[in-house]
Image: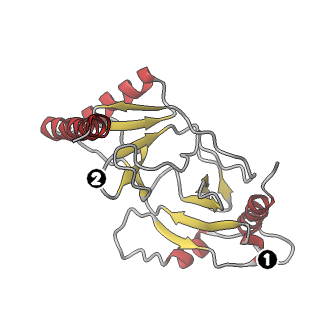
């Protein structure tokens, strides 16, 4: 069964971005004003704006706009959070006249459900929507400093990184390591190869967390 509240929210966002007979579509300048962007402030973003409550949005939890001032591929990410707390993301790039689809990213403004992709762990990082070999190749490229521009979600509690495939929008998931649901969107900006010591520390933290989880599991099963 279709989610009518989600469909109304997508229709509202479509009208906001594309405009209608009464109102022009949202421009880059309009978006900058909404998020409070100031060119004198040096930031990679994202800067965000949450649409105020109104009847068209009553069927969802929130609609948020994320502005990335310096990203060469993605200018805007629209996030619609439904009543089940699932996030539906659409990516856009401003071409000087209108909003277009970034290469390989989803921007179709239709109310579709996201399917949770497979998740792989390599070297302390997690990879959503990647085959095992692809995840290993990307992890190696990240270590060498050759993956600048790659999108990922960052856990605000333990700094776990979850890289997601550019062919699909990232679903709403908690941090695979600590369960924290507060993840922020980031873009990898490595200019130099990742320090080997930092990589080893990341792997060590992942191993320590796994051992702690195993000990807790054994205590629950075996008792004190």
Helix, strand or loop under label 1: loop
In the drawing, does residue 122 fall left or right of residue 92? Answer: left
Residue designated by label 2: 158
- Mark 1 or mark 2, which has the lower sequence index? 1
Residue 222 in the image, given as x and y percentages of width and height: 27, 34
In the drawing, does residue 9 fall left or right of residue 118? Answer: right
Q: Quadrant of residue 59?
A: bottom right
From where the camera sits, is residue 193 visible?
no
Helix, strand or loop under label 2: loop
Q: Nearer the viewer, residue 43 or 61?
A: 61
What label sits on residue 5 in the rendered view? none
Q: Nearer the viewer, residue 212 or 205?
A: 212
Q: Residue at x 42, y 41 (%)?
A: 163
In the drawing, does residue 184 fall left or right of residue 223? Answer: right
Residue 103 in the image, given as x and y percentages of width and height: 59, 41
From where the camera sits, is residue 223 visible?
yes
Residue furthest right in the image? 21
Instruction: Say how many tags the image has.
Output: 2
Q: Residues within 10 Å of mark 2 (few under 14, many from 20)?
A: few
Q: Quadrant of residue 177?
A: top left
Residue 140 in the image, given as x and y percentages of width and height: 30, 28
Measured Cα–Cα span from mark 1 to mark 2:
44 Å
Q: Residue at x 57, y 39 (%)?
A: 116
Is residue 202 depicted above or below 89 in this figure? above
Q: Quadrant of residue 136?
A: top left
Q: Residue at x 40, y 43 (%)?
A: 176
Is residue 80 depicted above or below 106 in this figure? below
Residue designated by label 1: 23
Q: How is the image coloured?
A: secondary structure
């Amino acid at each position: 069964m279709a989610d009518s509240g989600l469909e109304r929210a997508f229709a509202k966002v479509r009208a906001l971005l594309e405009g209608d007979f009464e109102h022009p579509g949202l421009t880059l300048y309009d978006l900058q004003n909404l998020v409070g962007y100031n060119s004198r402030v040096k930031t990679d973003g994202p800067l965000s704006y949450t649409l105020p409550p109104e009847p068209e949005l009553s069927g969802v939890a929130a609609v948020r706009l994320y502005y990335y001032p310096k990203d060469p591929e993605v200018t805007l990410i629209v996030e619609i959070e439904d009543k089940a707390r699932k996030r539906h993301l659409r990516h856009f790039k401003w071409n000087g006249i209108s909003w277009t689809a970034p290469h390989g990213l989803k921007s179709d403004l239709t109310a579709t459900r996201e399917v949770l992709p497979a998740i792989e762990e390599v070297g302390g990082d997690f990879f959503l929507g990647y085959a095992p070999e692809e995840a290993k190749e990307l992890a190696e490229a990240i270590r060498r400093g050759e993956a600048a521009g790659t999108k990922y979600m960052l856990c605000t509690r333990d700094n776990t990184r979850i890289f997601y495939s550019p062919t699909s929008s990232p679903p709403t998931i908690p941090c695979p390591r600590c369960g924290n649901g507060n993840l922020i969107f980031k873009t990898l900006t490595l200019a130099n190869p990742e320090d080997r010591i930092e990589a080893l520390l990341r792997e060590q933290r992942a191993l320590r967390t796994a051992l702690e989880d195993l000990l807790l599991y054994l205590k629950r099963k075996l008792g004190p």
